[in-house]
Every structure is written in structure tokens, then in C-alpha cells.
Image (tube, rainbow, N blue to C red):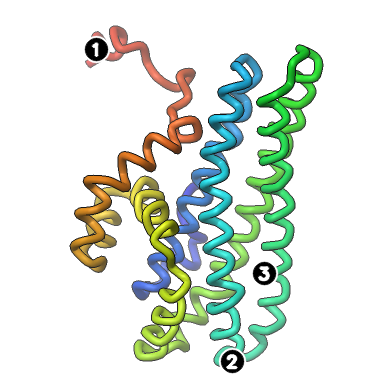
Amino acid sequence: MTDNPRDDVAAITLSEHSRLLIASHRAMRADGRRLITATHRLQDRRPSDALALGRAFAEIVTLIHDHHRAEDDVLYPFLTTRLPHFEHDAVHLEGDHIALDAAMARVTAGLRLLGRAATPTIRHDTQQRLHDDARAFNDILTDHLDREEAIIVPAFESTISTSEQRTLEAAESKLATYRHIRMAVPWVLANTTPDEATELRRTAPRLVGVIHDHLWKRRFQRVMDPLYRPDPRHQQPRRAAATAA
């Protein structure tokens, strides 16, 4: 599994709206896999580490909820009035959102319980359930993203005019709070290639890039470190890496 969209979607020339959608989905896919690794590492960590991971995951939950709200309240209704049969697809996609809400709630509860578990047996059992729930969340998430991209992106790019896309973007922007933007911008940029980041910066207001570089990025890195920290098992010791170089 990769961070990239489906092959049939990747072959399409994308509008700015679809590029942002795909970039958000890439961040979600990467975080789903990070969560599996991070919950596995908790088996030999302190309760405070579970609580720190819980705070990081809470930010991801908020970002995903904001993303789904924009889809449920703006994008899906917009497409329903313009694409034949999309109403049927919207029902299934919103059903995915409900399933994801439940999956994220289970992970959130598991991290909270692990953060206060006292006895070794309870800690072990809670961590095992949490790791299973993280895997289940990742499976539901990736299946939903694949399905959504396959349904929306080709139809959007072939049917929705540039003027209609601007109308949609204006409606979506009304839901974007400062709290969302200050996390969403570094989140997306942290999960893009350098070329993709350059293109996203080019199309964004210059002030957004300045604030990101001087404020948002550092806050994001600090809060998200328990989830984004590299797995030490996949890193070479510094001395060995230097010798190999």
C-alpha cells in the first residue's frame, strides 16, 4: 500500500481542487500506517507515551472530521445536483464516514485507557486491542479513500467547469476556521514530495507559506511527534550510517 491515489486516478490531469483532495488523502493514508507502528511501539512504553500519542491522534481526528464535514455538507450536495446517480454514491460514502467515526472513537478510547492502565495484564490486553483497532481503522480508511477517489475525481474533472469549481471552493472556504488551517497546511505539506509542496505553495497565498514556516510547522511537529517520530527499528545507528557513507 502506498500514499498515492489509485492508478486510474493518478493518470488524470487534476484541477487544483482535486490536487488538494488527493494531498489530504495522502496524509490520511500515511497517518493510518503511522498509527499502526506507533500503537505497536506502546507495548513497552510508559502510560504517558500513550497519552501523548492520544493528543497527536486527536489532532488527526479533528482534521478528518473537518474534511468529512466539508464533504458531507458541501461537496457531496454540490455533486448530487450535477452528476447523475451521485446521490446513491453519496449515501455509501457518508456511510463510510460513520464507520470511520466509530473506528476513530475506538482508537481514542484505547489510547486513553492505556494511558491510565496500572497492572501489566491490563496494559498488555489494552495495548493488543488498541493495535488491532488501529489496523481496523487503517483498513476502513484506505478502502474509503480508494472508493471516494474512484467515484469523484474522474467525474469531477470531466464534468465540473472551472467556474463551478470556483463556486464550490468558495462554499468550502466558509467552513475553514483558523484552527483548521493552522493544522491542515503543515499536515498536507508534511506528507508531500518536494515538487508537490512547491506546487501547493505556488497556488496558495504567500502569507500562508510565511506563517507556516515561522509558526504552524513548528507547532505541528511538536504536537505530532509521538505519531510522526520515525520507527527506530528502521533507522541505522549514526556511526554505522557514517561508515557506510
- Pointer 2 with pointer 1, Cβ within 8 A: no
Q: Tag 2, which secondary structure?
A: loop
Closest to the camera, between mark 3 and mark 1, is 3
Q: Earlier in the sequence, mark 2 or mark 3?
A: 2
Closest to the camera, between mark 2 and mark 1, is 2
Q: Which mark is residue 242?
A: 1
Q: Tag 3, which secondary structure?
A: helix
Q: Type of residue at label 3?
A: Leu
Q: CA distance from mark 2 to mark 1?
A: 59 Å
Q: Which mark is residue 93?
A: 3
Residue 49 rendering spot, x and y as whole percentages: 56, 23
Residue situated in front as seen by the camera: 14 or 181: 181
Q: Which residue is mark 2?
A: 81
Q: Tag 1, which secondary structure?
A: helix
- Pointer 2 with pointer 3, Cβ within 8 A: no
Q: Earlier in the sequence, mark 2 or mark 1?
A: 2
| Quarter occupied by residue 228 | top left
